[in-house]
Amino acid sequence: MMTTINYQQHLLPLSRQQLVDKLAEALTEDRFHHVLRVEQTAIKLAKQYGVDLEKASIAGLCHDYAKQRPDEDFLREIKEDGLDPDLLNWNNAIWHGIVGAEMVKHELDVWDEDILNAIRHHTTGAPVMSPLEQIIYMADYIEPGRSFAEVVKARELTAKSLTLGVAYQTEQTLAYLVERDLPVYPATILTYNAWVPQNKGEL
Ligand code: DGI
Ligand code: FE
Ligand code: FE
């Protein structure tokens, strides 16, 4: 069942429909449908775990807002905002969340730090994440369009415990990167150390 949140417009100056229209314009069709599914998954988790539904909707819709932007947009944003210069050594996979959050702030007029952190941390996680950040991190991973083998267990664990879901995704993502000889962003390792060892026995 599809839930439509009626925005109070205290978090951004748009109705939900106006925000959806902007996303349809900014994203490819596949990516647009992914963010709609992440929104719905985030709302469901927010109901279960007692998180603000409007924040879950906005963060779910906006988490990949910058995914289709050209590299030069990210490079300019990193310099103009004085973000960590090490970001210049990475690519879209890392930029679209961490740097994309600044584009959401400036272009969509979203100033709520919990929503912005949920966007910033949705790819790499972070050692400390609010319930909203954990929900967006998990909703992106378990939305109904995902079909990789580990998603079944990720959905089960997340329904039981948000913490265990976060630990499981973090463990799987690091293993995925190492298996493929991909570079691991430092924050991804910090997330692993903060979430995985102490929960390993329950995964
Ligand atoms: O944007 P989505 O495709 O919905 O999902 P995402 O933002 O979680 O992941 C984007 C990509 O980032 C995905 O292919 C996995 C990759 N990724 C996650 N952590 C790291 C990473 N890539 C590198 N190189 N290093 C990381 O630490
Ligand atoms: Fe993403
Ligand atoms: Fe996503």
Image: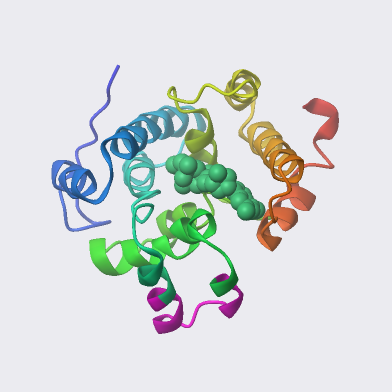
Q: Quadrant of residue 107?
A: bottom left
Residue 92 or residue 22, whichever sits in front: 92
Is residue 138 shown above or below 89?
above
Report if residue 184 is visible in the image.
yes
Asked whether, in this view, residue 172 is left or right of residue 60, the answer is right
Seen in the image, is 57 located left or right of residue 137? left
Asked if residue 71 lies left or right of residue 174, the reply is: left
Q: Quadrant of the N terminus?
A: top left
Q: Which residues are magenta?
A: 76-87
* Residue at the spot 84% in from the left edge and 42% down from the top edge: 197
Residue 22 horizontal/vertical position (percent): 18, 50
Q: Residue at the spot x=85%, y=29% of the render? A: 201
Q: Is residue 9 left or right of residue 127?
A: left
The structure residue drawn at horizontal position 48% and vertical position 34%, both measured from the top left corner, is: 139
Magenta run includes residue 167: no
Q: How is the image coloured?
A: rainbow
Report x, y in % for residue 31: 34, 39
Q: Nearer the viewer, residue 37 or 16?
A: 37
Magenta span dominant secondary structure: helix
When the figure is inspected, residue 34 is found, relative to residue 101, above or below; the finding is above
Regarding residue 132, the answer to whether it shows in the image is no
Q: Residue at x 24, y 35 (%)?
A: 5
Q: Nearer the viewer, residue 99 or 178?
A: 178
Residue 70: percent from the left, percent from the top? 35, 62
Residue 141 percent across, percent down from the top left: 53, 34
Magenta stretch: includes residue 82: yes
